[in-house]
Amino acid sequence: MTAQRAPGGAESAASDAAPTDLPHAIPHDISHDIPRTASADAPTASPRATPYDAVVLAGGGARRLGGADKPGLRVGGRALLDRVLGACSGAGTTVVVAEPRPTARPVVWAREEPAGAGPLAALDAGLRSTGAEHVVVLSADLPFLEARTVDALLAALRESGADGAVLRDADGRDQPLVAAYRSASLERETPKLAAEHGGLTGLPLRALTARLQLTRVTDAVASFDCDTWDDIAAARARIREHGHVLDEWISAVKDELGIELDVDTGLLLDLARDAAHGVARPAAPLTTFLVGYAAARAAEGGGPEAVADAARKAAALATRWAEEGESGSAPDATPPHTGSAPDATPPHIDSAPDATPPHIDSAAEATPPHARPDPGQDARDDMRPDAG
């Protein structure tokens, strides 16, 4: 694939993007190129209505990375290959064309013959292990690819009647290694190319796509690929930005733990705030842990609803807890160890006029409990989604 401009002024081949076109500066926007024969107002079928398979090309020499193991390079704590596999987790069969390696989920392994014969030969090798009507073809160096982009490609393919739907980058270039194709179209044209050229070795994928009718989906972020170390640095920087870090972290944790569950981060952050403010600061992580445990024990099929229900119950409990604390520190409250007589003196305070309780340095500095600074304020500040 063709990389976009990287930070620090370095530029990959065939790139004329401005420095502000770094992935972290591009809004995530998906637009469909609807063919003239299709209506933009036509109903869209569910992207998962028809099963699809996926072929991920993870070979290649990574020359611009000095021969590094590119699929194994980590962005946000996850290997690039695992990030791509997460985006196509809805595939019935996922084939990775490369030497086998540990992956976050099970895949089928394939290899082109001879090894290193090029992307078209690799695609042909991967297709031999698929059987679905549609196949999603991906490279293994896409740090920002998400399932919604895969779904958009499949939906565009189904709506258009074309042979394939390819992703288009911010500069309007087709990315044939981020695409959804009709398997029949690939199976029809690939043997013709092999016959014309005496095999597929060394042929670029564009030799195949030039023979296909294509529709396009534009996604400037998902099309960003990592061909250079500057690209890797740009990707790592973006996921740590304020607007992305929580979603990236949740995705990484779910991938690491094998959790297939949408998480309402706003709901959990509100619960953590309530627990920190109403109970004590360390109650925040402990409470959210218990909510997750309760949701896991819920009846099968509870899903996000089980998390929301447990979170509501825990938040209500934190509110009741806080209310009891506030009523106990009201100005007219009488400590249980103090007598009802106006001149009663707590046993730990000397009756002399200038006596000072041992736990207060000066009577002038004494502050009634209800007037003291809120001990949970720092916790709320730390846990606000918009905290710096």
Image: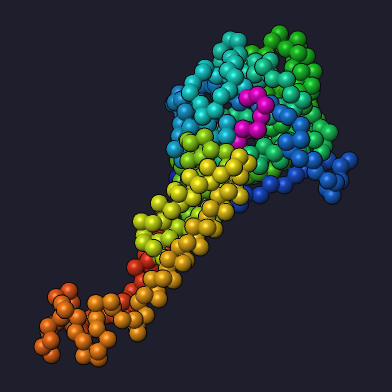
Q: Main secondary structure of the magenta part?
A: loop
| Magenta span includes 312 | no
Q: Residue at x 77, y 43 (%)?
A: 33
* Residue range (magenta): 87-94
Q: Is residue 25 visible?
A: no
- Across and down, in percent, residue 97 comes to 59, 20
- Decide: is 70 above or below 337: above
Residue found at x 74% / y 38%: 47
- Image quarter where the N terminus lies is top right
Depth check, front residue: 192 or 91: 91
Q: Position of residue 198 (x, y in %)?
A: 71, 8
| Image quarter of residue 94 | top right
Relative to 296, residue 123 above or below: above
Asked if residue 35 lies left or right of residue 275, the reply is right
Q: Residue furthest right?
A: 37
Residue 68 place in picture, x, y as percent: 44, 26
Q: How many marks?
A: 0
Please say if 59 is above or below 42: above
- Residue 10 vs residue 219: left or right? left
Quick one: 285 or 37, which is closer to the camera? 285
Q: Is residue 91 magenta?
A: yes
The residue positioned 31% from the left and 76% from the top of the image is 369
Residue drawn where x is 49% and y is 57% of the image? 314
Query: Which of these two is toward me, 28 or 65?
Result: 28
Image coloring type: rainbow
Q: Using residue 40 as the reference point, say whether residue 135 is left or right of it.
A: left
Image location of residue 170, percent across then percent down: 64, 44
Residue 37 visible to the viewer? yes
Q: Quadrant of the C terminus?
A: bottom left
Q: State the image quarter where residue 208 is shown.
A: top right
